[in-house]
């Protein structure tokens, strides 16, 4: 049984953590990052950013590195991510 169950609503989703019983809302960028890490657990932060940059269009004023770091911290705080 997979630890995380995802229910998508357009480009947003909720993630149910079967280990903790918690459900969390993920905004589009955080969802993309979460799925990328789940599918490629060995990628470094710089590699994650490179993939995200090629797959996601961000507003011109958005700083990818800061957004990635904030989203990774959020995922860790929620208990959805242990690495990177």
Image (cartoon, helix red, strand yellow):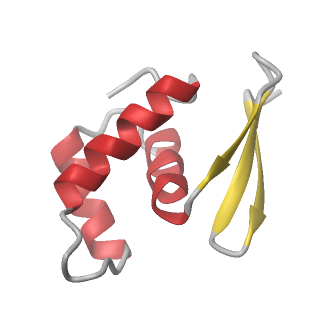
Q: Is residue 36 left or right of residue 10?
A: left
Please tell me whether residue 14 is drawn above or below residue 52 in the rendered image.
Answer: above
In the displayed structure, does residue 14 sit left or right of residue 37? Answer: right
Q: Residue 20 versus residue 48: which sits nearer the camera?
A: 20
Q: Nearer the viewer, residue 1 or 32?
A: 32
Image position of 41 (left or right of 3): left
Residue 46 position in % (x across, y down): 16, 47
Tell me the quadrant of the picture where the C terminus can be found.
top left
* Residue 79, image quadrant: top right
Q: Residue furthest top?
A: 20
Q: Which quadrant of the figure has residue 10?
A: bottom right
Work out whether 16 lies above or below 48: above
Residue 57 appears left or right of 64: right
Above or below, comparing residue 16 to residue 28 in the picture: above
- Image spot of residue 73 (x, y percent): 37, 33
- Which of 55/68 is in front? 68
Q: Quadrant of residue 11?
A: bottom right
Q: Position of residue 22 (x, y in %)?
A: 77, 27
* Total numbered circles: 0
Q: Which residue lies at the image location 56% right of the left edge and 59% below the top edge?
A: 27
Q: Quadrant of the N terminus?
A: top right
Residue under the image location 51 percent in, 46 percent down = 34
**In x, y percent, where is residue 71?**
39, 45
């Amino acid at each position: 049984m997979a630890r995380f169950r995802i229910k998508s609503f357009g480009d947003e989703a909720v993630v149910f953590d079967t280990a903790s019983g918690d459900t969390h809302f993920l905004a589009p960028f955080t969802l993309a990052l979460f799925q990328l890490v789940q599918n490629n657990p060995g990628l470094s932060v710089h590699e994650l950013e490179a993939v995200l940059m090629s797959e996601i269009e961000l507003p011109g004023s958005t700083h990818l590195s800061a957004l990635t770091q904030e989203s990774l911290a959020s995922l860790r705080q929620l208990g959805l991510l242990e690495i990177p």
